[in-house]
Image (spheres, rainbow, N blue to C red):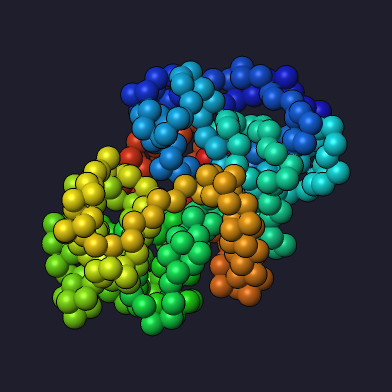
Amino acid sequence: MTIPATMRALQQTSLRGPRDTRLITDAPVPHPGRGEILIRVTAAGVNFADISKSRGTFGSGPRPPYPAGFEAAGEVVAVGEGVTEPRPGARVTGVGDGAFAEYLVLPAAAAVPVPKGWTAEQSLGLTVNHPTALAALKPLGRLAAGETVLIHAAAGATGQAAVTLAKHFGATVIAAAAPGKHDIVRGLGADHVLDSRRGSLAAEVLELTGGTGADLVLESAGGPGFADSLAAAERVTGRVIVFGAAGGDATISNQQLIYEHQIQLIGLNIGVLMQAAPEIFGAVMAELFALVAAGVIGPARPTVYDLADGPKVLAELEARTTVGKLALRP
């Protein structure tokens, strides 16, 4: 296969959000270094972290201008020094900077094979959304059969994965989503679906649980609703796993933890989990692919757009008008 010198790609030019994401047609095609592979991107996953990066709120995120996107799936077309697997021609999915492009360099060791019978775009989510949901539910959230879990943004890609997995693990699922998305969440098996835009979420959860609260809360809303998530968790034994901040930053003081919200509060970033606790991450991925083999996790059905539509798709995701997994096709 002939690899061109330049490619189409999306570039983030400011920290003012998706409006300053630009399509360029002369981005240099990267070369794989030692331990790396080059893939021809079939589809790139769109995630809320892309919004956070474009707003400068993603931890120590990149400074503009930078190549946008970080999740992609495609075919290996070249390998760097020392790489024996995966080989050229293999179909993989993974995480690497600059995924909104025709070609992407990935660490060979972190490239995940596309499951047999799946298309590359159907594998999107296996390295971001599903591992996040599974890590939040199991090793960090310690979810047990018969417990109750509250899942925010339940109609999003990670939320849908969490609902499916929580039901498989025998939990009672309370899902929060915008009204127009309730039927989708019910179709995944959620036991109760609440309006995420109402300000009475904690009260409704307490009513549904007989006043005790949820055993586990998957918190990705942030902003003004963060305190409501804490109030929805059972006192002392309730766990709140924080892995997103779609509604903006939120704070909690030691005084509040002592006298108002006596809960177990845990932060989750899947990239940090991978680096800082590789044994936990490895166990999560092993269980994930066992669930794929068992048919519990099926192929993704992303809504796919052309790469040029990336700024519009990102803006719609930020406005929370989208449902499920979103993807860009170069």
Identified at 71% across, 54% down, the residue is 113
Identified at 65% across, 70% down, the residue is 290
Q: In this view, does 321 lie above or below 208?
A: above
Name the image quarter holding the C terminus. Answer: top right
| Occupied quadrant, residue 240 | bottom left
Name the image quarter holding the N terminus. Answer: top right
Q: Is residue 230 above or below residue 49?
A: below
Name the spot of residue 295 as percent of width and height, x first: 60, 73
Q: Would residue 169 appear left or right of 179 to someone viewing this image?
A: right
Identified at 68% across, 46% down, the residue is 110
Name the spot of residue 309 as percent of width and height, x first: 45, 34
The count of marks equals 0
User: Is residue 100 shown to the viewer in this render?
Assistant: yes
Identified at 34% across, 56% down, the residue is 265
Q: Is residue 9 above or below residue 88?
A: above
Is residue 86 or residue 147 the one in the foreground?
Answer: 147
User: Is residue 161 shown to the viewer in this render?
Assistant: no
Q: Would residue 36 appear left or right of 153 to someone viewing this image?
A: right
Name the spot of residue 60 as percent of width and height, x first: 45, 30
Is residue 99 or residue 265 the one in the foreground?
Answer: 265
Q: In this view, does 58 lie above or below 181?
A: above
| Occupied quadrant, residue 126 | bottom right
Q: Would residue 129 appear left or right of 277 to someone viewing this image?
A: left
Name the spot of residue 34 as percent of width and height, x first: 79, 31
